Image (cartoon, coloured by chain):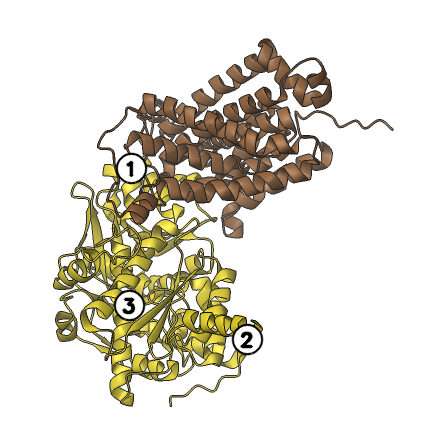
Chain colours: A yellow, B brown
Amino acid sequence: MKLKLISAAVAAIVAAAPAMADLTFSALSYRTGPYAANGIPFADGYQDYFTLLNERDGGIGGEKINLVECETGYNTEKGVECYESTKGSGALVYQPLSTGITYQLIPKATADGIPVHSMGYGRTSAKNGAVFNNIFNYPANYWDGASVAIKHLLDLNGGDLKGKKIALVYHNSAYGKEPIRTLEELSKKHGYTLTQLAVDHPGQEQKSQWLQIRRERPDYVIMWGWGVMNQVAIQEAVNIRYPMENFIGIWWSGSENDVLPAGEGANGYKALTFHNVGSDYPLYDDIKKYVVDAGKAAGAGDQLGTVLYNRGLYAAMLAAEAAKTAQAMHGTATITPQQMRDGMENLEMTEDKMTALGLPNFGPSFKVSCANHGGDGFGAVTQWDAKAGKWNMITEYMQSDQEVLNPLIAGDSEAYAKENGITPGCN
Amino acid sequence: MPDQLLFGTEVFLNGLMAGVLYALVALGFVLIYKASGIFNYAQGVMALFAALTLVGIMDGQVPFAHLINAVFGTEVHHFGWNIPSFLAIILTMGVMVALAWIVQQLIFRHLVNQEPIILFMATIGLAYFMEGFGDIMWGSDIKKLDVGIPQGMNALIDEVTYGAFGYGFFIDNLDIVAAVIATILVILLVLFSQYTKQGRAMRAVADDHQAALSVGISLNFIWVMVWSVAGFVALVAGIMWGAKSGVQFSLSLIALKALPVLMLGGFTSIPGAIVGGLIIGVGEKMFEFLIGPMVGGATENWFAYVLALLFLVFRPQGLFGEKIIERV
């Protein structure tokens, strides 16, 4: 009897354990908590893309994809717990989906030899792969975002921002403070004055900040917000009749969730992006056919084509492409996390490749290398059309000011290397 | 008038308005604490749940649609009708009364005469349950709430002050409506507790459960009534805050704004919640205006608590709270 019980237990454990021959990807998602409205579309897009690969292509290189999802609630401690509890599943890469979690995982994942991809968030200087061997933040980071915003304003002002007043409304956290250094450096170069307006978490009350904006009348407002802070800021801007076309949010302040509560008033609000918007791509035909119509869509299947769904889709696609690169490099379909890291470090995304994947004109072309884990820093600007209820990309992809950013990245990453006793170098 | 004085006056007025919104949340805490000695941790979540229910009813959303679709393989999301906001508010109030009854029957009836900390823990459990329940019932997407309350700058105040001082003051129409509603609410609540049979019974229960029971007051009825009134206050707070940011999970965090108000105004005084709200609102806004720029801004959250603590040092029961006398 005892033997039977032990056998049954062993069988149950074996059945419950992930199939190690599969390619395991982790999804540190947040479908609950204050940020669930943003976490759900991203997680759905991420999951749906892998479901599509499994259903249409039989996985990647003939290996099925095993997606291990863990709920973080956008909480750093829970995120770290998720990492610790799932890393044994053989996850090839972690996408923490939170700057706080990313910072915690940088030393842990590096020690464990598992790559981390923080796409459009996390530690900006991780772009220096010679210091941050296992951390990647392509195709763009926060400093790229700040620089692209200024480039857009330069374009609007004939290349001259001298004497202009720019206000930065930011979430009073490590995330919100990320662009300050870049914007300060760029203000020296372009001659604008920068006013910094911090908003305390969660950002439901911003009257003081917007009264100050009303008094000082800055020419432009840039926002680094998240969650409820975005909706309140946009509503307050509408209330004080601030021209919405002069109000630009980072890509985490530019989803449908952020503008819909303000209704018509949000028309003209702008946001940065590193991928295109909408669902008018051939890939979506396949998603409908193999995922949605087959009843295999993640969540309620109602997020297709939203900004954050597209971002999740794009993140999964870049992970899958890195896995393919790793398989080709190492001549095996069943790659390890370390081989995945190699694939990420040699990833090249071109417009031809994107078109072949069914996403023409969706994301910028970029090439990753040991010295450059962050891509080439291309971003674009989108604008909200309240009447049509959709975002439109209104610029081409612009490259961030590498002349200003590269020394900042080098300085910050070298300081990190010194603090942590890392000898920078490429394998 | 010098510019700084003008700006300061505008900030002061907006502080008063913000204070009213804080007081709306604090009122719900006061009502329940006054009648039952329970510090209701779930008050913020009640505001969220009430606002979610209101939007759901107005938009004809099918409750538990996600769950129903997952279990039965259906594709139901909406009933296909929209309900006028006034009727939806009444229906939502019905839901809040039902919730009060359920909470009383399933939780607090079984905890009569328990230590306050046990009752407090029960409300923590209730808060987390309601968060998840609201999520499953109405979904976690951010919903636009429009019950017809005007929003944006009040043009009349802007014009009048511009004519008088050469600078138009910004006052949000929504804040003005909130101030009027809060005033009416406080008057009604004071009249109710002072001049109606149920109100007097409520105060009797608050003073001494056992004595109230001995004279034939139904503890059960009074507590259901109080939780229902607190549900109504939560609905009003949910509408006001939801109109500013959309109805979303973060609404539950507005309770954090009420705590310093309660510390300052006292846990048992309805006028105290209003006065406390106004002091906190003005205090935090003026501090941010005058001192904020020198210390990097974002002072409002912590300064509200510093202000409340300062009051506590000199008056532990709060400005209007009942003085704690323990006979030995």
Q: Secondary structure at mark 3?
A: helix
Q: Which mark is residue A316?
A: 3
Looking at the image, residue B10 sits to the left or right of residue A256; the answer is right
For badge 1, the amino acid type reads Arg
Give yes or no for contact between labels 2 and 1 (Cβ–Cβ under 8 Å): no
Residue topped by disc 1: A241
Query: Would you name the residue on which mark 2 appears?
Result: A3
Q: Is residue A116 visible from the viewing direction of this image? A: yes
Give the camera-side residue of A76 and A152: A76
**Are discs 3 and 2 both within one chain?**
yes
Q: Residue at x 45, y 24 (%)?
A: B179
Q: Residue furthest right?
A: B328
Task: Kindly identify which chain the residue marked by label 2 belongs to.
Answer: A
Q: CA distance from mark 3 to mark 1?
A: 39 Å
Label 3: chain letter: A
In this rendering, position of residue A325 left or right of residue B278: left
Say which quadrant the N terminus of chain A sits in.
bottom right
What secondary structure is marked by label 2?
helix
Residue found at x 45% / y 55%: A73
Which amino acid type corresponds to the residue marked 3 in the rendered image?
A: Ala
